[in-house]
Every structure is written in structure tokens, then in C-alpha cells.
Amino acid sequence: MNYLDAFRDGELARRLAVAIGAEVDERRRYRLMEFCGGHTHTLARYGLEQLLPDNVEMIHGPGCPVCVLPSGRIEAAIELARRPEVILCSYGDMLRVPGRNGATLMKARAAGAAINMVYSTLDALDIARRHPERQVVFFAIGFETTTPPTAVAIKEARRLGLKNFTVFCNHVLTPAAMAGILAAPETLHVDGFVGPGHVSSVIGSRPFERFARDHGYPVVITGFEPLDVLQAIRLLIRQLNAGRAELENEYSRVVSAGGNPKAQALMEEVFTLRDHFEWRGLGSLPRSALRLREDFAAFDAERRFAVTVDAIPDHKACECDAVLRGAKRPEQCKVFATVCTPDNPLGSCMVSSEGACAAHYRYGRFSAARANA
Ligand code: SF4
């Protein structure tokens, strides 16, 4: 724990913030996007934005796996759960994300659907083993970090000969989402990226090189402790001041250029790319998500239950689309902290602790001045 505490040292953080202040060029603005919801959470929890100079602006990205699933996929999960033969297994955060007309898995469960909250894919497998009379569907979500455990569960289900276990696969890919942000014409001007730490521990830092080399954006991969995030911001500012656009790895204690080959091999064995996938906020992005390979089709819930995914509009007042693109800050949504709260989330960004709206609400660090900027 001492090791972690060293990355949370308040005095060091203040000194780092002073050093950042000494390095910024007062004549310019620095608009830096942190891709990961985990980084957004760290910024809010430790009040890091308040330590930064006024001309350094953090723009929250779409890296919250709960937030980016569109309502149509939530609704499809609810429909699966309503089938009398199905037990749907889901991570807890997904239970409160609104689908069609405010429907949620939580409400479906209250109405009688069999929905179990699980902490791991292996919990879902265990339920399948204990209930051979039911069809157990695992609602799989997340970026590259949570994909290998889903692959393990599928392979284990096959090894055990389980005929009643399937996966509703909604795993998505980080580099494709970053490319989607840069391709969107209405994207706000972003100067550089705080790159994902956990995802890079799996896929390596190399997939992010192209954003520096081909697109001219500095990228600094970093961890999730406050000193990690501040150091990444400092490195980005140095690159921008020097006119450089490079990939740097601040998180070398965890991330290598090549990542985790075993996890990558598992993903490659079980999953293949979808041609397109609809993201909340980013629209339909090519080759940005995974589905099960033919070899594992027997474990694919979309095939077994002929799942269809409809385009379902979000609540009229909800600005999650803009928040996820970095086009608006949470407090710029008119219903933020009034109608929309963690107890009564109107949009997905208020549900998970990685969601930008939930992070801002929870730590109360939203500023009226910035909201009206
Ligand atoms: S405050 Fe609520 S409705 Fe508004 S963008 Fe955030 S989650 Fe969506």
C-alpha cells in the first residue's frame, strides 16, 4: 500500500501543479482530453483540475464502458432478461442505465425478470452450472480490459460442456473510439490526449502511436493515481510547448509497448471485429467492437436468441452524447444535479463512477464559471 500512497502524496501533487504552472505558456490554451473514465474519476476525486492553471482545460472523453452503450443495446438486454427461460447476469452498474422510456434492468428485475448482479464472468459461469434448467446470458461490456475475462469464461464454458451459457457481447475497442473522436466534424479542438492505462496494459502502448505520428496529437499513457495524471499533463504541456507530437508512456511500471500477449491471444482466439458498432455519442464506428468468432457461435446470445438492436433516442433533455464527445461538460447539461442525479439518472453518464456526470456530481467539483464558459 505504501507504493500506492506514494502516488497520492498531496504535497508532491501541489509541487507538481506548481511546476506545471511554471511551464505553461500564458499566451495559449491547452485543451487535453483524458480518454478514460478512470482518469475523469481521479481528476474529480482529487480536485486536480482546481490545481491546474486556468489555461489548462481537461476535456472528458468517452472511456466509460457503461456510458457508451446506446439505449438500443440496454433495451436488447432487458428484452433478453424478460424471456422466461433466461437468467441475465450483469455487472452492477448496467442495472441502472436507462433504456427505452426510462426502462432499466433494475426495474425489469423488480417486475419479475431473473437478473443477477455478478462481479466476474466466472460468477456467471457458476450460475449456469447451478441452473442447467435455465439459459444463463452474460451481458458482457467494456473495453479491452474486460474482454480477456469474457474470453476465459467462454472457453471454460466450452471445456465444461455447458449448453446453457451464452454471452451478449458488447466489448468495444479504445483506438477505434479515439479515431472516432478525431473524425467527428463537430469535435472540439483538442491539443493532446491523456492515454488509457488499463487498456494499454492489455494491448500495449503501440496502438496509440498513430495518433501522434499520423494525426499530430501528443499522447501520454498514464496510470490512475493523482501524481500519474498530473505528470501526464506536465508531459503533454512540454510536448506542446516544444511543438512535438509523440507517444510517451508515463505508466511504464505497468504498460509496455507490446502489452500482454497472452490476453491478446485469448481475445484473438475467441473474438473477431464487427464491421460497425453504434456508440452512444460517437455514432456508428467501423471496426470498433467485437463479436464471437464462428468457432464459438454456440456461446453467442445474439445468435441463440436472434437479438435485434433498435435505434432508441435518449431522453430529450439528456446531453450524454455531447458529454461523451467532449463537446460539453457535465454541468452544461440543463438537468445536471437537478432532475438527473445518481439516485435518479436520466442518462448513462450519471450511473457509473467512471461516468463524467457521476464523477462531477459525487465530488461536487463542478464550477459555474466553467459551465458558462
Ligand atoms: S446530467 Fe444526466 S442527462 Fe445530463 S448529460 Fe449527464 S447523465 Fe446525461
Image (cartoon, rainbow, N blue to C red):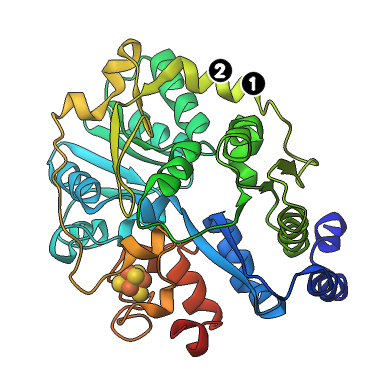
The correct choice, above or below, for 30 with respect to 77 in the image is: below
Query: Which residue appears at 66% of the width and 80% of the height?
Result: 50
The correct choice, above or below, for 129 with respect to 335 in the image is: above
The reply to whether the residue tagged 2 has its Cβ within 8 angstroms of ligand 1 is no
Residue 137 visible in the current orientation:
yes
Q: Are marks 2 and 1 in contact (CB under 8 Å)?
A: yes
> Type of residue at label 2?
Ala
Q: Secondary structure at mark 2?
A: helix
- Please state which of residues 171 and 127 is positioned toward the viewer in this rendering: 171
Q: Quadrant of ligand 1?
A: bottom left
Q: In the rendering, at what x and y percent does residue 37 appear?
A: 52, 57
In three-dimensional space, the C-alpha distance between marks 2 and 1, rounded to whole angstroms, equals 6 Å
Q: Which residue is mark 2?
A: 265
Query: Which residue appears at 75% of the width and 70% of the height?
Result: 25
Q: In the rendering, which numbered label is found on residue 261?
A: 1
Q: In the rendering, at what x and y percent does residue 363 appear?
A: 56, 79
Q: In the rendering, at what x and y percent does residue 112 appear?
A: 16, 55
- Please state which of residues 99 and 133 is positioned toward the viewer in this rendering: 99
> In the picture provided, is 21 more to the left or to the right than 95?
right
